[in-house]
Image (tube, grey):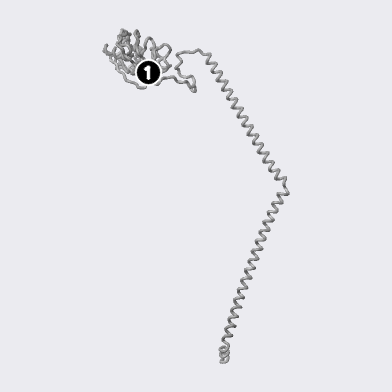
Amino acid sequence: MEKIKKFVKKNQILLIAVCVCIAALTVAFFAGGNRSENKVQTASTASSLSTTNADTETTSVSATEKTTQNPTDSAKSNKDKKDRKNSEDKKNSKDNSQNSNSSAVEKSEKSEQSSNNSSSDKKKPSSSSNSSSKPNKKNDIQPTTQDKYKTDPVPSGKPKPVEPEEQETKDTNLYCTFTITCSTILDNMDDLDPEKIELVPKDGIILKKQKVQFKEGESVYDVLVKVCKDNNIHMESSWTPMYNSAYIEGINNLYEFDCGSLSGWMYKVNEWFPNYGCSRYVLKNGDDVVWCYTCNLGYDVGGGYATGE
């Protein structure tokens, strides 16, 4: 034991060097083993990549070979597509042509129908009473020639309306005749408000025909107010801006709707029922004015034309 100790002590440096060498060899040994494993893994990865590339190349080559070997199939497919497209184009063209022909036929038929209608209209006799009548067909569009106060064209030879704000009164004295009647109520007593029966004269005449003096430029309404005042006859009116005229609601306490839903007061001058308000009718010397009560929108007094029928 002592010899060993002496030997170790004597050769201590040498032993350390040997240990170092052994340790170095051990490390080198393990390091070499890891490198060989890495090389093996790298080789395996390279082999896998080469295999994959080879498969890809094979697939590409097979696809190329298929395309190259069957050029007729590809051409045939392209040809089929073109044929289908041409067929669809021809079909669409044919449909468009049919639609065009159909439209042309319809236009031609409409044109012929319009021509027939115009020729038939020329054959029909014209009538002034129908100038403001309702169209026969709902789809017919009649041009309107009404003025801003909803007045239809005035018949030829009849005086045109004069707006109250444009009327000029002169000191010249003129004369006209004036009558107020409600005789139509006598034929419709069943429709009359029971409270108004005693207001209806037995002969239906509220004011017998009389000669009335007025100023040049005065309207039918102006003279009516004067006549009712001079003869103690009740009269009530209201202003209607839409028609730019006074509207007579009641005379002698007989009002509109007192004798049915179609009843009310109307006026006529020289046997003509004007189609505009009494404030717009300027009287002339010698005119004959009649105020009459209607129970049927003027048809029972001869004034149906004034309603536009």
What crowding class fits label 1: few (fewer than 14 Cα within 10 Å), some (14-19), or many (20 or more)? few
Extreme residue in the bottom direction: 2
Front residue of this view, candidates 2 and 237: 2
Total residue callouts: 1
Q: Which quadrant of the figure contains the N terminus? A: bottom right
- Examine the rendered structure and indicate whether residue 102 appears above or below residue 159: below
Quadrant of residue 61 in the image? Answer: bottom right
Q: Position of residue 269 (x, y in %)?
A: 37, 11
Provide residue 209's location: percent of width, then percent of height.
32, 8
Left or right: residue 74 compared with residue 100: right
Camera-nearest residue between 138 and 190: 138
Residue 172 shows in the view = yes
Residue type highlighted by circle 1: Leu
Q: At numbered mark 1, what does the secondary structure look like: helix, strand or loop?
A: loop
Please tell me whether residue 178 is drawn above or below residue 49 in the rendered image.
above
Is residue 186 visible to the viewer in this orientation of the structure? no
Percent x, y of residue 101 = 61, 27
* Image-quadrant location for residue 298: top left
Q: Which residue is mark 1?
A: 262
**In the rendered image, which quarter contains the C terminus?**
top left
Residue 271 image offset from top left, x and y in percent: 38, 10
Whether residue 20 sits left or right of residue 237 in the image: it is right
